[in-house]
Amino acid sequence: MNFKVDDADVDQYYERVKKQAESAGYHLNPDIEFTKSLLKNIIINMKRYGYGACPCRLASGDRKEDMDIICPCDYRDPDLNEYDACYCGLYISGDILNGEKKLKAIPERRPAKEEREKIAGYHTETESSLELPVWRCTVCGYLCAREEPPEICPICKVDKERFKRFM
C-alpha cells in the first residue's frame, strides 16, 4: 500500500486542524515542524487504517478497539488539565503557548486492553424516565439529549461515532 503523504496535504490538514482547535479554545503546539510531523503521521494512519489514530500509540487496525485513540483522543483533555499538553504534544495549554510553563513528558494514561474492555462494558442501557437518550462526547464531555448523537460534536468537532450513550 502507498502511505506517501505530500507536503501540500499536510499543510492543508494543518490549517484545518488549527482552525478547528482554535475555534474550540484549544492550541496546537507552536513548533510547526513538529506539529506537521504528527499530522503527517495521522494522515498516514488514515490511509493505513481508515481512521486517524494517534501517531504516538500503537493502533490495532480495528476502529472500534482504537476509538479512544483517534485524534483528538479521549485522553487529550485530562492530559491538558493535568500536564498542560496531550500525550503526543499536539495540543498544549495556553500556559505552555505563552511560555509560562515548559512542555514535559506526559505519562501514558490509556488503560491496558483488558481494562478498556471492562470500562467499555460498564455503561449498560438501563430504563430511564427521560424522554430522550443522553449522549456524551468521549473526547470533550459535551452532553446532549436527542434520539441520536449529533453528526459532529459542536464543541470539539469529532464525528458522531465518538459519542456514547450516557443515560
Image (cartoon, rainbow, N blue to C red):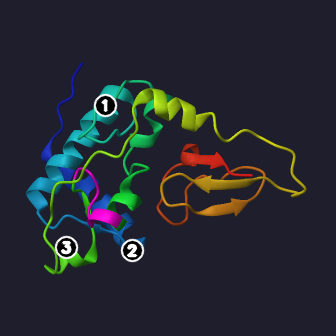
Look at the image and say whether residue 15 sits in the magenta stretch: no
Is 49 located above or below residue 102 in the figure?
above
Say what secondary structure mark 1 lies in: helix
Residue range (magenta): 82-88
The residue drawn where x is 27% and y is 63% is 83
The residue drawn where x is 23% and y is 48% is 39
Give the residue pinned by disc 2.
Answer: 25
Q: Is the N terminus in the top left, top right, bottom left or bottom right quadrant?
A: top left
Please state which of the two labelled residues, at mark 2 or mark 3, is closer to the viewer. Answer: 3
Say what secondary structure mark 2 lies in: loop
Look at the image and say whether residue 86 sits in the magenta stretch: yes
How crowded is the residue under tag 3: few (<14 C-alpha within 10 Å), some, or many (20+)?
A: some
Quadrant in which residue 57 is drawn: top left
For badge 1, the amino acid type reads Lys
For badge 3, the amino acid type reads Ile
Please state which of the two labelled residues, at mark 1 or mark 3, is closer to the viewer. Answer: 3
Residue 96 image label:
3
Please state which of the two labelled residues, at mark 2 or mark 1, is closer to the viewer. Answer: 2
Give the residue pinned by disc 1.
Answer: 47
Q: Position of residue 26 (x, y in %)?
A: 35, 69
Q: Position of residue 115 (x, y in %)?
A: 48, 33
36 sits left or right of 151 in the view: left
Quadrant in which residue 86 is drawn: bottom left
